[in-house]
Image: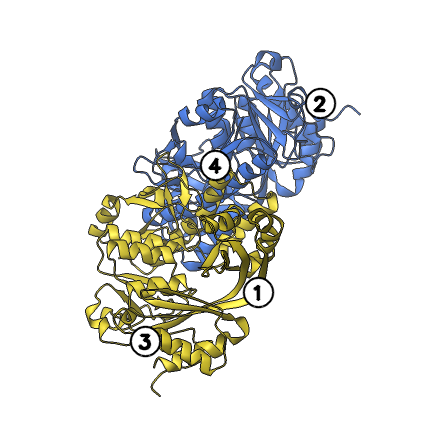
Chain colours: A blue, B yellow
């Protein structure tokens, strides 16, 4: 068994808080390098403490920092990517009967500097370690006991999924279901590592057979899955805002000329729509997080609209995104229209639509979020049987 | 400039406290290894924070953990010894105009494990780094502004010494003057690194000429020193206890047969005296710390005294040791007798005497400590002139 702990609760924030008390952030490499030196201590401490606790239970165990394994990454401080993991040292300890504890979240770059993988990087570390060791399963212990058809706080009838396909999980993670960090899911997909999401409060003495029934298995075998529900879950994102630039002369490069300045201002854009142009004029809409809304509007009105010769920029600072996700959508027609009909029957106006092979997202007024999620959960037969 | 920070105040205790909350200490290598993994994070965090603070002041700087330099040590976890320091990486940064920050207290063993040097090890790290880089001086910033003729809390007339010889410093450190960790002084002696003890509250913008007048320089040049006072300082140790084994048959190996079991019980012994034997019976006395007194007495009475056929073990749980230290004692007769006369004039009974080339220590009743130190400080002309 190899264990990949994250830092103790609140520790990473405490450490980074000390840095920002000392000095404002300096957007340069030498500063990010020190942030990584600093933040990496959180997992090193929790890993050593876990080894001590296991030893006290009579279990031989040893902890390694990322650089000791080593977990090799590129040099992108605070958001490094794992490039390779040397499994020799870990394997030697496993062969000697030790539980090996490897710090999550961190590695070492080619020049010997400590790097971190960014927030939530411990999940990614665990999956990468599982891939390197060709582990039979990677168990991710979180604050929920699995992946649900939707957020149980919104829909009490939500069910835990015993399995979910890798692609569905990827969509759900990217659509705001915060169970797993999306990079860890991508990594699992790349290396075909079966992941199981479990509660941290799973009894520690559960046997493997019981554990195999707990949580949610993220699988790569689609066959068994295809027979099941067309829609696996309803994902949603609160706290978004919509911005439309109206009456844009429809020339090549509109998207870049509008979104280029937005990206330069470090504003992340989610759904993007360009309407069919009428009379040579197009409407261009996109969503941003509510925190970035005012900044984006100011930027558009002061700079982008006049430069483009567009008519105006209008916005709605309180919308949300609701998505149905299901690998079955690939082979079932009419899924999207069921979604649209359900929302229409509830009197909910759809403002934007965006689709991919296995999901359909709609942007609606934020006040309808709960209503929409509950109606769709029922309409797609996801409610608990009792 | 190379800076060697220790952990933030209280941090090492906080980390080790977390470990002891989790599990009782397990006296085995695998446990000590994890303690070092844990404790080493304290200096790594403070080093990264210092680099961030310096960068914010516009000073290019970079921090390295011991393993990155690398500072090579043996594998004695929690009390490792530095074996070699590779100066290549540090030198390259210095040449590039960076302030280099190296974590104190820690290194890496031949197998790539993190080791720590034990409490106060950051001083030793700094001296070792100064030796490796052939630095002109190693400045140790502490909570006092130098080495004093004695503790100013006991003798308000105590003076700061502008210089003190390496050997005197070694005696004072070993005799309870807590300014410097004794290992760092030994290390400085071995590599002839001039050390200066300064206050942490020395103004940061002090120029080098002013700094060279501050604190206390620990020097290796005896010539200038020899002209000065015969006695440089009065050191003392509170909290000791005395134990005597009386009526021991005077056969070879007494010391070993008495102190062997004491050492095995991990009790540290300080002053040791064996009296001239009468009628084939000897008295054997030694001092231990007060915390070990009861354990040592039990051990002697239950085991050592009966096995040796000694008469009895008696003790005094509240004595102290007072020492005069001075390199001038080598060439001046009568120094010890001045000490004994001074104490006698104050009515203080001397229980044990121990001498070396440059110090004379006496064991007396703990209640006379302040009186003895003040009287000796005056007798040897150490009081401030005003």
- Rounded to the nearest angstrom, the CA distance separating label 3 from label 4 is 63 Å
In 3D space, how far apart are the residues under numbered discs 1 and 4 (Cα atoms)? 51 Å
Alpha-carbon span between mark 4 and mark 2: 42 Å
Q: Are marks 1 and 4 on the same chain?
A: no
Q: Residue B91: x, y in percent?
A: 22, 48
Q: Residue at x 43, y 45 (%)?
A: A311
Of residues A279 and A14, the one nearer the viewer is A14
Instruction: Name the mark nearer the viewer: 4 or 2.
Output: 4
Q: Is residue B1 above or below residue B324?
A: above
Identify the disc placed on residue A103: 4
**Label 4: element kind:** loop
- Is A77 located above or below residue B313 in the figure? above
Label number found at residue A381: 2
User: Percent from the top left, x then y, of residue B275?
Assistant: 46, 61
Residue with the mark numbered 1: B316
Q: Name the element at disc 2.
A: loop
Pointer 2 local density, CA inside 10 Å: few below 14, some 14–19, many at least 20: few
Name the residue rendered at 55%, 74% in the picture. Answer: B367
Q: Where does label 3 land, which residue?
A: B334
Q: What x and y, as percent, mark residue A235? A: 61, 32
Quarter occupied by the C terminus of chain B: bottom left
Q: Residues within 10 Å of mark 1 (few under 14, many from 20)?
A: some
Element class at badge 3: loop
Q: Nearer the viewer, residue B105 or B328?
A: B328
Mark 1 belongs to chain: B
Q: Earlier in the sequence, mark 4 or mark 2?
A: 4
Instruction: Answer with mark 1 or mark 3, whichever residue precedes in sequence.
Output: 1
Which residue is pictured at 24% across the width and 57% down the height? B192
């Amino acid at each position: 068994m190899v264990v990949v702990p994250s830092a103790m609760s609140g520790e990473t924030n405490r450490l980074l808080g000390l840095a920002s008390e000392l000095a404002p952030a300096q957007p340069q490499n030498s500063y990010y390098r020190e942030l990584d030196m600093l933040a990496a201590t959180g997992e090193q401490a929790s890993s050593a403490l876990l080894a001590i606790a296991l030893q006290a239970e009579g279990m031989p165990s040893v902890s390694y920092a990322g650089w000791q394994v080593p977990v090799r990454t590129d040099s992108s401080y605070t958001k490094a990517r794992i490039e390779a993991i040397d499994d020799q040292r870990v394997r030697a300890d496993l062969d000697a009967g030790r539980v090996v504890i490897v710090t999550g979240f961190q590695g070492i770059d080619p020049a010997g500097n400590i790097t971190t993988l960014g927030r939530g990087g411990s999940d990614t570390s665990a999956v990468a370690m599982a891939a390197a060791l060709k582990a039979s399963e990677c168990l991710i212990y979180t604050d929920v006991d699995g992946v649900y058809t939707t957020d149980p706080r919104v829909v009490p009838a939500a069910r835990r999924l015993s399995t979910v396909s890798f692609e569905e999980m990827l969509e759900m993670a990217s659509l705001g279901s915060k169970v797993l960090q999306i990079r860890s899911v991508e990594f699992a997909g790349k290396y075909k590592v079966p992941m199981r999401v479990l509660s941290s409060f799973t009894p520690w003495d559960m046997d493997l057979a019981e554990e195999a029934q707990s949580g949610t298995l993220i699988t790569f075998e689609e066959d068994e899955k295809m027979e099941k529900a067309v829609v696996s879950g309803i994902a949603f994102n609160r706290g978004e805002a919509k911005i439309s630039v109206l009456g844009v002369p429809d020339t090549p490069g509109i998207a870049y000329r509008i979104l280029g300045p937005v990206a330069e201002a470090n504003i992340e854009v989610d759904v993007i729509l360009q309407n069919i142009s009428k009379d040579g004029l197009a409407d261009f809409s996109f969503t941003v997080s509510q925190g970035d809304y005012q900044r984006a509007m100011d930027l558009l009105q002061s700079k982008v609209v006049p430069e483009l010769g567009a008519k105006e920029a209008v916005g709605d600072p309180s919308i949300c995104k609701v998505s149905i996700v299901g690998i079955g959508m690939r082979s079932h027609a009419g899924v999207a229209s069921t979604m649209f009909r359900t929302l229409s029957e509830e009197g909910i106006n759809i403002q934007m639509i965006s689709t991919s092979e296995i999901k359909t997202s709609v942007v609606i007024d934020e006040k309808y979020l709960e209503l929409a999620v509950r109606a769709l959960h029922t309409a797609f037969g996801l409610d608990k049987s009792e």
